[in-house]
Image (spheres, coloured by chain):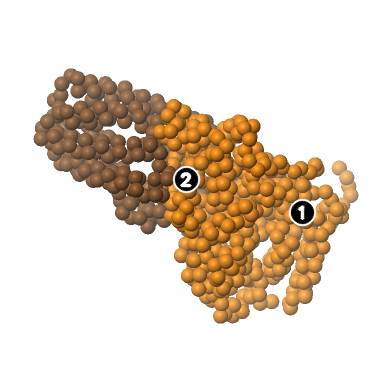
Amino acid sequence: MENKVGYALWVLQEPVQYICLLAMASMYAIKIYTLMKKPGPPEKAELKGDRFAGAIHSLLNVLRPWGMESTSKNPYFYLEFLVFHIAVVLTIGSTFFIPLFPTLMTPVVTKVIMLFMGLAFLIGLRRIYRRFTAPEIRIISSPDDYFAIILMTTFFGVGFVTMSLWLEGKPETGWMWIFFLMTTFFLLYVPFSKISHYVLYPFNRVIFGQIFGGRGVLNRNKTDIKWLPR
Amino acid sequence: MSNSPEPAVAPAESTKTEKLGAPVERKWHVKSEFTPEMLQEMEKLLPTKLSRAVAASLAGCIHCGMCSDACHYSVSIPEDKTLLPAYKADRFRKWYKYRFDWMGRIFPAFVGAKPLTKELAEDMYDKLFGGCTMCRRCTFNCPMGVDYGLMVRGARGILTQVGRVPENLQDTVDTHYNHGNNMAVPQDEFVETIEWIEEELQSEDGCENFKIPVDKKGARYFLTLNPREPKYYPLTIQASAKVLNAAGVDFTISSRYWDLTNYALFNGCDPDAKLFSQWQVDDVKRLGCEYLLAGECGHGYRALRWESPNWVGGVPFKITSMMELMAKIVQDGRIKLDKSVWDGHRFTYHDSCNIARSGGVMEEPRIIIRAAVNDFVEMEHNREQSFCCGGGGGALAMPEFAKRRIAAGKIKADEIRATGADHCLQSCHNCTDQLKEIVDHYGIKAKVMNLAELLSPAIVL
C-alpha cells in the first residue's frame, strides 16, 4: 500500500508526531528518574528464594492468567484485557507503519489490525458500561478513568474506520486526519494520565517479584523445599 | 583483657529485676481527632514515607477493580463498597496525587486528587487502621503488583507519628518500649513462669529429664515467644519445649528479650521497629546462639525473619521459625509420632498471612500436619491465596473496630465450616484469638490450636 498524502497531513503524520513522541519520552524519563531516585526495597535477610527469578516471574505475570485468582476466576475478563492491549500495540504501531513503512500495511496486515481494533472497540464499550454501572467500579472511578476508557474506545473506533478506508486505497481522508490528531493528543496526554500505567508496571512488578521471590513465595518448588535451618 | 573464666550463664540471669526496655519510659500522645497542626505535620512527613515501592504503588493503581474479590473485608461485607482495597488505598492516594502527581497538582478533581483535610485524614484513619489488615492478598491479585501492605503501613506510620493511632495498639507498642515485652511481664515473673512450665513438662510421662534452659550461653537456638504464651497460654510453651526436647534440639530462652512480637510493624513506626529488633539482636549475640528461633507467631515471624535484618542493617546469625524447625525434625525422623491419638478428628490449617504470603512458609506446616494426623482437609483458599482471618495488622488491638473485624472474618469462618473440620490449626497468636472469636460467633464447632500443640500429644517417647 502507498501513503500518498498532502503536505499538511504529512506534517501531522511525521514531524508533529516525532515532536510529540519526544515530549512523551521526556516526560517518561522524568517520571522514571524520579522513581529511581527513591530508595529501593532493601533485603538484608537471608534469602529463601531468588529475587531475580522472582522479578522475571512477576514481570511475566501478565502472560499467566492462572497465576492470580483475580484472572483465573475471570478468564473472559482476562481475554478482553489481552485483546484490548494487543489492539493498543497494533493501533499505535499502525501510526508509525502508515507514514514510515506503508508497504508493511498489506491488506492482510491491515485486516488483522482492523479485527483487533474492532474487538477492542466493543470491549471498550463494555468497559465503559461496567465503569458507569458496577458499584464497585463506580466508587473508585475518577473523571480520568472515564475519560481514558472513552478516549481509547473512540480511538479504536476511529482507527477501524480509518483502516477500512485505507484498505480501499484512500490514505488521505477526514478520518485519517482525526486518527492522527488523536494520536498527537495521546502522545501529549498519556504521560499525565492513568494510561501511563504501562511505564509503572515494570516497577511495581519487579519490586513485587524481588520481595516475594526472595522470600520463597514465588517460583517455589513444593517438593524440594530449601530448609532453614540447614 | 581479663583472665577470669567466662561465666557459665550470661550476666542477665543473675539480675532478675533488671530494667528492660528503654531507659526512660514514655507515653505516646494519642489524639482523638485531627487538628490543623497535625495535618501540617503530616504534610511534612509524607515525602519521608515515599520509598520506591510505596511511590510506585501509589501511582500505579489503574482502578480496574480486580482487587474487589481479594479482600476479606469486601468479600465478607459486600454491601459496603468503601471496603474495597482500591477505595481504601485511595484515601491515601488522593492526598499523594494532590502533592506529587502532575495532573493532580493542576486538575486535582480530574484525577481524584484531594488536599489533606480533616475529613480525608479521618477517612484514612478509619479505612487504613480499621479496614485493612495489611494481609497483602489484594497485592497478590493486583495485575499491576501494587503493594497495598507497604502502602498502608507507610500511611499508618504518618498517622501514628502525629498521634492519630488506635490507643490500644499504641499502648502495646509503648509497653514494649517501656518494658522490653508488649505485656510488661517482669523479668523475675517470666523466669518463674518458665520454671513452672518446666516442672509441668517434667511431670508428663517420659519427660522427666526435659529442660527449658534460660539464658544458656552458646545454645544453638534462641527461642522467642509471644507474651500471650507466658501470660495466657503456658501450655503452648510446654508443647514447644516438649517437641524440642524430644528431638534433642539445643535451645534456650532468654530472660531478657524473649518477646518476638513487634507491633511497630502494625503502627508503622520505623524507629520503634528498629529499636525492638536491635534489643533482640543484641540479646542473641549476648548468648552466642546460632539461630534466632521464632515461636509460632505470624507477624512476629515476619518481623524477625524478613523485616528485622533490614531495620537493623543485617544480623550475624540465622533466623528461622518453629514451623520450619518442626518440619525439619519431622522430615529427619528425629521424633516418632503416633497418628492414632488424633483419630476421629478432622483438621484444617489456616495460613497466617505473615507466615505464608509475606513469609514464604507454606509447605512446612503441611509436612508437620500430615505426619501427625490422618484426616487433613485444605480450605478452599490456602497458602498464598489464603484469606486473612481478620485478626492481622494489629486488628485485635483496636477494639473500636471490633465489630467490623468479626464481620470481616465471615469468609474464613465459612471456609472452616466447609471443611467439616473439628480442629482448625494455625501458627499465629493473633490468628488464634481471632479464629476463636469467629468460630464462636459463627457457630462452628472447631477447636483452634497451634502446630506444637498438635505434635506434642502425638510424640512417642
Tell me the colour chain A is drawn in: brown
Query: Which chain is depicted orange?
Result: B
Can you see residue B269? Answer: no
Q: Please state the total of marks drawn on the protein image.
A: 2
The answer to which of B437 and A112 lies nearer the viewer is B437
Q: Residue placed at 32% from the left, 40% from the top?
A: A149
Q: Quadrant of residue A199?
A: top left
Work out whether residue A226 or residue B43 is closer to the camera in this orientation and state it. Answer: B43
Gap in angstroms between the C-alphas marked 2 and 1? 38 Å
Residue at 28 percent of width and 43 percent of height:
A124
The tag on residue A150 is: none
Residue A27 rendering spot, x and y as whole percentages: 41, 27
Q: How far across and how far down the image is residue A116, in percent?
A: 23, 43
Q: Secondary structure at mark 2?
A: helix
Q: Quadrant of the C terminus of chain A?
A: bottom right
| Front residue of this view, candidates B444 and B375 | B444
Location of residue B211 (image quadrant): bottom right
Q: Chain of mark 1?
A: B
Q: Which residue is under mark 1? A: B184
* Mark 2 neighbour density, 10 Å: few (under 14) some (14–19) many (20 or more): many
User: Looking at the picture, does residue B126 appear above or below residue B249?
Assistant: above
Report whether mark 2 lies on the same chain as mark 1.
Answer: yes
Q: Position of residue B179 (x, y in %)?
A: 77, 50
* Mark 2 belongs to chain: B
In front of the other: B279 or B144: B144
Residue at figure coordinates x 42%, y 35% from the top left: B111
Residue annotated with mark 2: B87
